[in-house]
Amino acid sequence: MPQLLGIGEVAARSGVSVPAVRYYETRGLLTSARDGGNRRRYPRSVLRRLAFVSAAQRVGLSLEEIAASLAELPEGRTPTRSDWTRLSRSWRARVDARIAELERLREDLDGCIGCGCLSLRRCALYNAGDAARAEGSGSRWVREARGS
Amino acid sequence: MPQLLGIGEVAARSGVSVPAVRYYETRGLLTSARDGGNRRRYPRSVLRRLAFVSAAQRVGLSLEEIAASLAELPEGRTPTRSDWTRLSRSWRARVDARIAELERLREDLDGCIGCGCLSLRRCALYNAGDAARAEGSGSRWVREARGS
DNA sequence: TCACCAGCTCAAGGGGGCTTGAGGTCAAGG
DNA sequence: CCTTGACCTCAAGCCCCCTTGAGCTGGTGA
């Protein structure tokens, strides 16, 4: 007996609002069974899915990307250890990438402090943003940022 | 002779669109002088401001927060080294915080891989999101995330 | 029996961050 | 002189991510 949850309880426990939970369903992040009175019933694993969604948003992923990621989990059965392991690992890579990006940014910022930003030609932060000049150079994180 | 830039050149060099530059002005992130024909004229330092804006957005700050941050820079004169140093340092703290947050997340994720997420009671990611249970416990990054 | 409250659906609204479009103004070049 | 192109000012529209509201249903307890 899997002990199904109502949407209210799901919302309370996940910290996601009731309408948001329904919205996620329309966006394909979640599915639900219905009881006799047409009310949504969720297995406890939905809490894990929602925790995953919230965390992924925090990392900057769109709901669509998150949905794609979650689509790798089986809807029909309870995810196994290896299901989650695969997902967690792939996601960890994204977290790592994001951290690396921020660290690069931090380095630029340090360089910026160092140069005092008085010399335009030497300022990493400035040059990173100067598309007309940085074309073909090494520092182009701003453009990459806009593309992703 | 500061060699002023037109909005088109500013846009091309900063990688920010022309309307976006104007929009930033309405949001108080930028100011501009006008020439005889009422066209905006920018000092070169606007490129630094825009690079800063793009970078700050990347870190997840809203335009309002960025505006508040930039408000500490002098509008009238060219920012001095210490102006930028102060700003960069305060911002670096935010970057550090964001990195720390992601690292915490990564640890949770590692724990999640370790436990295989089969035991709900032991899963860090799950418990972090379970508001009803985590109340008063140590792991509440999800709620903090939503509040900020 | 009846009130209540949790849910349901569908439609509209709202904030953030721009983009797009309409219509008008210079300044320069052929 | 007339076109072209860079700018200008609104105003409206868009995408994302939800929130809010209206109107209806169904199980539950006094």
Image (cartoon, coloured by chain):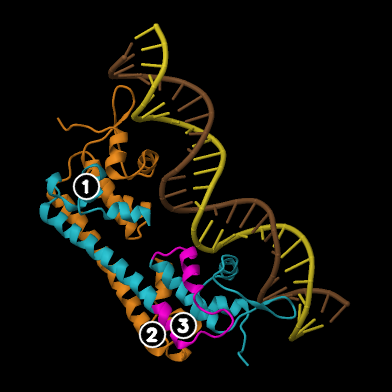
Chain colours: A orange, B cyan, C yellow, D brown
**In the rendered image, which quarter contains the C terminus of chain B?**
bottom left
State the residue position of label 3.
Answer: B83
State the residue position of label 1.
Answer: B134
Q: Which residue is outermost to the bottom?
A: B1
Nearest the eye: D29 or B124: D29
Secondary structure type for disc 2: helix
Tag on residue A113?
2
B78 lies left or right of A42? right
D10 lies left or right of A136? right
Q: Is residue B75 above or below residue B23?
A: below
Nearest the eye: B102 or A116: A116
At x 21%, y 42%, the residue is: A45
For residue C11, which quarter of the picture?
top right
In this rendering, does residue B81 appear at all? yes
Across and down, in percent, residue C14 comes to 53, 47
For residue B10, which quarter of the picture?
bottom right
